Amino acid sequence: MPIDLTDAVMTAVKIAIVLGAMLNITPIMVWVERRGSALMQDRVGPNRIGPLGLLQSIADALKFILKEDVVPAQAHRVLYTMAPLFGLIPALTTIAVVPFGRAFVIPDTLTYDSGLAFGLFGAIMLMLLLAAGTAAATVKFRTRPAATRLNVVVGWIVTVSLVGVALVLLAALLAMKSAGSVHIPGAGHLFEPIVADVNIGLLLVFALASMSVYGLATAGWASSNKYSLLGGIRASAQMISYELALTLSTVGALMAAGSLRLVDVVARQTGYFVLFDTVKIPAWNCLPMFLGFVVFVVSAFAETNRTPFDFAEADAELVAGYHTEYSSMKFAMFFMSEYMAMGTMSALIVTLFLGGWDIPYYHEPATFFGFLFSAVAFLVKISIMMFVFVWVRWTIPRLKYDILMRIGWKVFLPLALINVVVVALLIAAGWV
Amino acid sequence: MIPTNYFLILSAILFSIGVLGVLTRKNGITIFMSIELMVNAVNLTFIAYARQYHSLHGLIFVFFVMAIAAAEAAVGLAIFIRLFHHRETIDVDEANLMHW
Amino acid sequence: MFELSIFFVFAATAIVFALVVILHRNPVVSALALVACFFSLAVMYILLEAPFLAALQVIVYTGAIMVLFLFVIMLLNLQHQHEALTRPVQQFLGWMAGATFCLSLIFYLLQAAAPVMVSGAYDTSARAIGFKLFESYILPFEAVSILLLAAIVGALVLSARGSTTVKGDTEQAR
């Protein structure tokens, strides 16, 4: 099996893009979560580190790294250490089959002109502005008590790194002539913005997602703490129960696309439904499959252990669940995988029901800019979904566990089945 | 293209490990897991031969085997829970009520 | 070459984890090792051009069946069960019989002439399998669904505590 070098490089680039995005979800979402909850509860929220408290997540990460890593004496050491990894791997890998933009043909040459130079200049200015802001905020904190010393260190680290990025961009700007063009290696290849375009697409997502149960169950058991064990089993039972409704509610979208590949699912949604021969509305799956859409979104909340279904870590009532005994970076890894799972679920909701990277009433060209626009549209949709996750968490109170199980099995499972029948009828009628 | 024989030998080794588990262990759950291992070894053989003869029948059989393994696991584990409630152990030597 | 190296790596993991399953004294570790073994087998299915079944393997075996095993082991707290080493002769005979079985199986597999690989297209997509399943195999398919229903009812009746009494249950009071 010969390996094409260009393909390998392109795949590496795609993995870098997706992985970078996934790893940055956690710090961004922590900030959104904390500021968002503050907004909803009429508080101020973290506003000390960086402008608007934007660098709070970095300080949090540093705190996690510097904390002592405690392993309980009775714990099963090997499994206790490996459990966070079990949780992290599915969270990082499932995104591989989701297309994040329109495919485009790599052009022969990259022509750059004043526009690109202007963009680079703007980026440099922005970096310097952020650096100045951080530095100013940090200097202000110098006069505070010693408790904020860590914040000062973080502030300077961020300032220096921002200035560094600005310098690199400046070097690129200077190296660039005012106008010209560069030959691009790999020209003529089709760049498909999806890491693994396998023909079992969505099944792979569910296969990998079903592995995340082991992270919770193993963590709970290996801590050798009754509360952890019960928390782990509670969380796994919940995830397994809702996996059924989650899987069944996607069947409609797959039936309409006639394929398991998410690329086909998105391609089907780029068209339009024409109402009364005049009104054109985007053919997004959430309209004909509204029932499936609702079931999927609610099951996604349960699957990611978010309020109103966060029995895994109902901090006020049930101790903290499976990660009671965890501290330091191991705890941070559970935290990260929760937010990554949230990102993956948002990406799946957008891809399956909200048209993926499609921009309504606009036909993206198969060029780099078409890709860029579609990728930005995809990101915007995901961000809105993520905000919905935060919004719901701080709006709806936690349910009772028996209610959770009851609605999972007795309401959502039948609803998902009804959705399949409805979509089948719609397809038979030729409306979808 | 990897020769079919490689897969068959791997399957034979896994099946024998399953046999060994059933023969030498007395923990009921471990014996049950060894049986699952043997079932999976057979599945591997089915799929290897399906590719050999380009026939989907082997794959369909694996599908059915998986469904039946799920049913078997549910009932089998329920039996073990029952046994544990009676005897406080799942050692299969202890389940000797019908033994003469 | 690339495929072959993947095969050997995952064949080795499958065998090592299978050995952990039968040798380790802690059932939780055994169950997790079996999960790893099944995962390696899913890789084998992909090498055998059956990605649909690989996904099913992971969803059904590791995502459902093994979780059930793990639940039972964890909830019954089985890791404190110690196996007394009784009947050493039978143990030894068991090991010998297993090893002989394995070696003879491999020996005869090597003896047999490798059959010729059929050439041509080999479509293992979900669509092809689905057509086969719902056309030729519709009756077994329905039979399996009834079997699964029976298994659900059976498991519930067996594991329900107190509320239901199975015949012969009165022998030992809980």
Image (spheres, coloured by chain):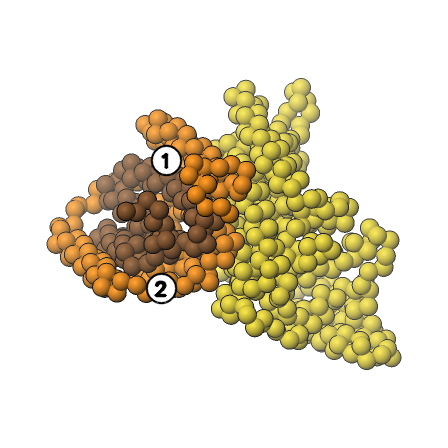
Chain colours: A yellow, B brown, C orange
Q: Quadrant of residue C150?
A: top left
Chain that bears disc 2 = C
Secondary structure beneath label 2: loop
Question: What label does residue A31 carry, if any?
Answer: none
Left or right position of C58 against A130:
left
Q: Quadrant of residue A128?
A: bottom right
Give the image location of residue A416, x and y in percent. Answer: 58, 32
The residue identified by callout 1 is C129
State whether residue A216 is above or below residue A243: below
At x 63%, y 53%, the residue is: A312
Give the amino acid type for the residue marked by disc 2 in the picture: Ala
> Which badge, 1 or 2, comes first in the chain's sequence?
2
Q: CA distance from mark 1 to mark 2?
A: 48 Å
At x 34%, y 40%, the residue is: B65
Location of the C terminus of chain A by quadrant is top right
The residue identified by callout 2 is C84
